[in-house]
Image (tube, grey):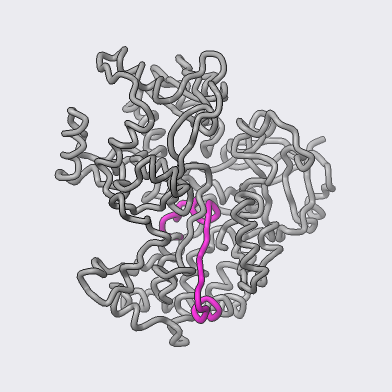
Amino acid sequence: MWGSNAREAHPIFFHHLLKGVHNGARLYAVDPRRTASAAWADVWLGIDVGADIAVANAVGREIIAHDLHNAEFIARATTGFEAYAAAMQPYTLDYAEQISGVPAEVIGGLARDYATAGTAQLCWTLGITEHRSATDNVLALINLALLTGHVGRWGSGLVPIRGQNNVQGGGDMGALPDKLPGFQSVEDDELRGKFEAQWGAPVPPDKGWHLSLMFEAMDRGDLRALYIIGENPAQAEADAAHARERLAGLDFMVVQDIFLTRTAQMADVVFPAAAAWAETEGTVTNSERRVQRVRKALDPPGEARDDIAIVSALAKRMGHDWGYPTAEELWDELRSLSPMHAGMSYRRLEALRGLQWPCRDEEDPGSPFLHGRLWAEDPAERGRPAPFTPVEWIPPADELTTEYPLRLTTGRRLDSYNTGVQSGGYSSPRRHGESLDLDPEDAAALGVEDGDRVRVISRRGSVEAPVRLVRGLRPGLAFMTPHFPDDVDVNSLTIDVWDPKSGTAEFKATAVRVEKVG
């Protein structure tokens, strides 16, 4: 588990993982904090924030140096191995220890155990993707799977554990700036053409802006109106104060949500939406690509309406009468355009309690795992080889200095969720509100004790919070959550520098100083 505190962020998944641990699986946890997940691990690698590529590259170098790589699989199913092996040479175990703080022998043990395991999985979450090197962090792990052949086989693979319900489904449906539904490129004339024929309208041939580029476009004045569905960027974005300034400067903003969020309070128009998990019909897709039916259990309250009804009514007001299609009618249109969903009729989804894509026709049982083609003997069946992609380590953008000597990282707690919009209205015996978690050694150096109120200051803003002493942290590392932004606006501290490949901001690596209040 690399950069994932699934015990608190994905507790149901973690219960399944623990079954494997109880059955003898060996668990490594690579995480700056000794989290509730790391407490179950055989080995915890207490990595410095942002050192993931250095450690992953050292693991790869160690595997090659001890001839533990799967040479047969590499030759048959991959490209670029020689260039990758050469690029890994500087990443010795000692060099990785110098960058990461993880002892060289521990990194070497991870390398040998991962390479020699009969089956092995690499699981990760936002701990490695909320960085300016987010995509390269993931590519570094993909390289390890290709190096060992731990991909495309039952029990082995690469497992991105999605951060929110139906994140996978959103991407599948085309909620990406460069993809149409089914991950079909908007820049491909043939693929785009079939959507244009179905929709009776042209589709722009160029990829659009991701969220970070949208905010930069607001700064330039190129983006003047915004329609936000189920998102709270006024509190969820890095450098949140700057994000609110950008939103306030728009000519027009519409928010469609189930709660009157901080963002909705800034909107010109608010569309109250139905809660998709209980008040609408449709589908949801989980982290293992399993599409499942969602069934309406009750009517939405007050003036709240189904998203489909809202968008259809809006289209009619704009001169395009689509009628009011049902969720199943829209799903069938999607299936006619997305080959990987073609076999997933409502009838089959209900009868089989879900199907995993790709599922290409009504006889296809779906796909329990991906990339099995890489093991095929027939080159035609094997298809395009998987490329090694050498990546280089770069440090976090927000530099530690004598003025800002502590590294603040952010994450979730078990009792709360994101900016607290959905969880903040409910009490929990585990909830203690926002705090600045510090290692006792740092607290002593700062002259503060458990419960003392402090001011946390970054290069972008400051907040006040009580101190909580946590022995799962190491000296130099502090932790906070975004769960209580109305009380402690943690994202006013975080930096909005972003990964040029994914657009994800570097929430996980903020330089701060701490001052006692009063």
Total number of numbered discs in the rendering: 0
What is the quadrant of residue 336 in the picture?
A: top left
Say if residue 233 shows up in the picture: no
Q: Nearer the viewer, residue 212 or 153?
A: 153
Q: Magenta segment: does it hold 46?
A: no
- Residue drawn at 67 percent across, 55 percent down: 477
- Residue drawn at 19 percent across, 40 percent down: 192
- Residue drawn at 61 percent across, 42 percent down: 458
Query: What stretch of residues is rendered in magenta?
Result: 112-137
Establish if 219 lies above or below 343. Answer: above
Q: Residue furthest bottom?
A: 66
Establish if 208 lies above or below 9. Answer: above
Q: Position of residue 380 (x, y in %)?
A: 20, 70
Establish if 248 lies above or below 214. Answer: above
Q: Position of residue 474 (x, y in %)?
A: 71, 60
Q: Nearer the viewer, residue 186 or 312?
A: 312
Q: Position of residue 493 (x, y in %)?
A: 59, 40
Q: Position of residue 399 (x, y in %)?
A: 55, 53
Quadrant in which the N terminus is drawn: bottom right
Quadrant in which the C terminus is drawn: top right
Q: Is residue 175 left or right of residue 486?
A: left
Q: Nearer the viewer, residue 103 or 78?
A: 78
Q: Is residue 112 left or right of residue 5?
A: left
Q: Nearer the viewer, residue 38 or 97?
A: 38
Establish if 198 lies above or below 140. Answer: above
Q: Is residue 158 left or right of residue 364?
A: right
Say if residue 257 shows up in the picture: yes
